[in-house]
């Protein structure tokens, strides 16, 4: 399980370029290494556990490799717990294949994207919620510890992505078994609630101790409520986006990644409470109903924001993989009843999935190569900047997407609390963020500016397309452009490299503040 998880995790983290969001999380971890804090020194709307993981990755000095290792551990832990749940109903072969189905689904490019996302890190904690409670039903001793871990799992998962709390509904079908096991008591409920509150209590204590509780509440609660309300966008735009992403999901997962969905055929089997092997002396648990509720609640957790991206559905993958248990169990039973037919089925599955897996991985490598070719000038620009500074200066990068390579590659301080300017001018809080960004840029101008719009900074923000459609953001950007025009100069050494086809490509421009003394060029 560990070996497969490590192999699956590699293309997601070490080959594909980072996305705009995930790169900023890496950069935040790097800045925390320098004593800065989220919510105080830079704005973002995620809760602290995500930044703690990236801080840990940055502390190793190799954040990309550290994220790869942590993702592999998360995949392997999730697969192992799925194996444990499956082992309760079927033999080790079917249970092991269920675990590997989860690893395959959870490691797929379209779902995990570039990995460093809240849903990905929340997934093993969400699985722990169900796994630990099932163990509490079965365990003759230490049941209280498993109950505590179940509550902790749901609390921790919700602190990465709050809507994942819906997965707690998958515990409801477990209540009869919990009652029969004598675990449905006031003490058990208090223990579970204590586990649930543990991670939120740690977060609150950390925020209070660092004096950032107020900004954290504003960023992570109030802003996210406004964001989740649809940001006042028309319904047709919201659902058109959802339809597009669903089509992408169906197209990109390919057949072999939908293998776990074969378990949905269990809905056609007469409904009954599954009974474990009588020799195990385990209490009956309706694991099938748990898996169905699990999958449904995981999918429902993607809905509050009404912006359906594939990774928002990531929590549903464990439920889909759990349902595949019955498909694998049927295959094992077929082997016992008709060995020749089972051999044919296994060969067909192996050949088909191997071919599809090869197609998928070839597509992943091709996409990675194309993206790296597209970003090559940005990468070279970041390397050039490193030769022109000792890293103590500040920087601001204009242009959606190029931050994903420049910011974490340099790890420099940003001149503003808003390294990624997200404009929501139709929201009051969005206007507040734009005003804060404008004030930061005018009062603390960065030492270096990088943009993709040539000499016009306005053109570097492609989502601000119309002065009349977004006048507030347009006006702020124009103010900053006018302010910077007389205070910055195009970097001459950079232009020389550009002329030689070296450190830059079309559209990428580096500005240096006129009063900035730079160290000699090392090219």
Image (cartoon, rainbow, N blue to C red):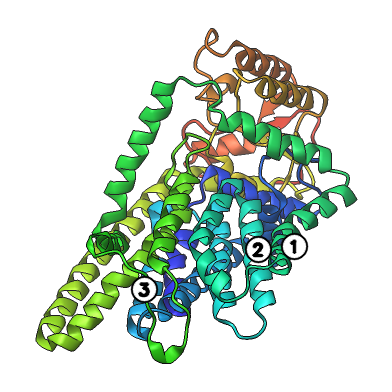
Give how far apart the Cα atoms at labels 1 and 2 are. 7 Å
Q: Mark 1 points at which residue?
A: 194
Dot placed on the residue nearer the N-terminal end, 3 or 1: 1
Q: What crowding class fits label 3: few (fewer than 14 Cα within 10 Å), some (14-19), or many (20 or more)?
A: some
Left or right of 463 on screen, residue 205: right
Q: Position of residue 4 (x, y in %)?
A: 41, 75
Residue positioned 80% across, 54% down in the render? 34
Marking on residue 274: 3
Dot placed on the residue nearer the N-terminal end, 1 or 2: 2
Dot placed on the residue nearer the N-terminal end, 3 or 2: 2
Left or right of 377 on screen, residue 28: right
Give how far apart the Cα atoms at labels 3 and 2 are. 25 Å
Element on which disc 2 rests: helix
Q: Are marks 3 and 1 in contact (CB under 8 Å)?
A: no
Left or right of 335 on screen, residue 455: right
174 or 504, which lies in front? Answer: 174
Q: Name the residue under label 2.
A: 151
Quarter of the image holding residue 316?
bottom left
Q: Position of residue 58 (x, y in %)?
A: 69, 61
Q: Is residue 66 above or below residue 3?
A: above
Q: What crowding class fits label 2: few (fewer than 14 Cα within 10 Å), some (14-19), or many (20 or more)?
A: many
Quarter of the image holding residue 363?
bottom left
Left or right of 511 on screen, residue 234: left
Q: Are marks 3 and 2 in contact (CB under 8 Å)?
A: no
Give how far apart the Cα atoms at labels 3 and 1 are. 31 Å
Q: Do the residues labelled 1 and 2 touch (CB within 8 Å)?
A: yes
Does residue 341 show up?
Answer: yes
Element on which disc 3 rests: loop
Q: Position of residue 439 (x, y in %)?
A: 78, 22
Residue positioned 39% across, 58% down in the render? 292
Residue positioned 43% across, 48% down in the render? 299
Q: Position of residue 384 (x, y in %)?
A: 61, 47
């Amino acid at each position: 399980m560990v070996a497969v998880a490590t192999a699956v995790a590699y293309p997601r983290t070490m080959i594909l370029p980072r996305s705009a969001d995930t790169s900023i999380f890496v950069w935040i971890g790097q800045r925390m290494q320098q004593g800065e804090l989220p919510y105080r020194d830079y704005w973002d709307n995620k809760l602290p556990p995500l930044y703690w993981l990236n801080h840990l990755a940055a502390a190793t000095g190799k954040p990309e490799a550290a994220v790869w290792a942590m993702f592999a551990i998360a995949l392997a832990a999730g697969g192992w717990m799925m194996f444990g749940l499956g082992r309760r109903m079927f033999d080790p072969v079917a249970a092991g294949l269920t675990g590997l189905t989860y690893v395959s689904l959870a490691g797929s490019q379209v779902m995990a994207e570039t990995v460093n996302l809240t849903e990905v890190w929340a997934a093993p904690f969400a699985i722990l919620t169900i796994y630990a409670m099932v163990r509490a039903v079965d365990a003759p001793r230490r049941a209280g510890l498993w109950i505590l871990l179940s509550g902790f799992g749901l609390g921790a998962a919700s602190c990465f992505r709050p809507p994942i709390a819906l997965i707690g509904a998958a515990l409801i079908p477990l209540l009869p078994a919990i009652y029969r096991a004598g675990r449905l008591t006031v003490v058990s409920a208090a223990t579970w609630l204590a586990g649930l509150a543990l991670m939120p209590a740690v977060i609150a204590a950390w925020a209070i101790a660092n004096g950032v509780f107020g900004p954290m509440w504003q960023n992570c609660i109030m802003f996210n409520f406004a964001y989740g309300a649809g940001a006042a966008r028309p319904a047709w735009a919201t659902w058109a986006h959802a339809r597009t992403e669903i089509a992408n999901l169906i197209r990109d997962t390919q057949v072999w990644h939908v293998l776990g969905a074969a378990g949905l055929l269990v809905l056609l089997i007469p409904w009954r409470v599954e009974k474990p092997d009588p020799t195990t002396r385990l209490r009956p648990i309706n694991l099938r109903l748990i898996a169905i509720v699990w999958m449904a609640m995981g999918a429902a957790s993607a809905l509050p924001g009404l912006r359906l991206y594939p990774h928002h559905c990531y929590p549903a993958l464990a439920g889909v993989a759990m349902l595949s248990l019955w498909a694998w169990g049927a295959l094992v039973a077929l082997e016992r009843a008709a060995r020749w037919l089972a051999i044919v089925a296994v060969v067909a599955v192996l050949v088909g999935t191997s071919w599809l897996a090869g197609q998928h991985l070839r597509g992943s490598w091709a996409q990675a190569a194309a993206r790296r070719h597209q970003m090559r000038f940005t990468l070279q620009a970041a390397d050039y900047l490193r030769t022109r500074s000792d890293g103590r200066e500040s920087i601001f990068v204009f242009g959606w997407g190029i931050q994903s390579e420049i910011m974490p590659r340099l790890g420099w301080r940003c001149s503003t609390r808003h390294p990624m300017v997200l404009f929501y001018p139709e929201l009051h809080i969005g206007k507040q963020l734009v005003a804060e960004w404008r004030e930061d840029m005018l009062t603390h101008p960065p030492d270096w500016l990088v943009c993709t719009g040539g000499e016009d900074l306005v053109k570097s923000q492609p989502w601000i397309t119309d002065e009349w459609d977004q006048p507030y953001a347009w006006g702020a950007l124009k103010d900053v452009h006018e302010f910077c025009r007389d205070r910055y100069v195009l970097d001459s050494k950079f232009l020389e490299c550009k002329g030689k086809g070296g450190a830059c490509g079309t559209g990428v421009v580096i500005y240096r503040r006129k009063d900035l003394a730079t160290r000699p060029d090392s090219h």
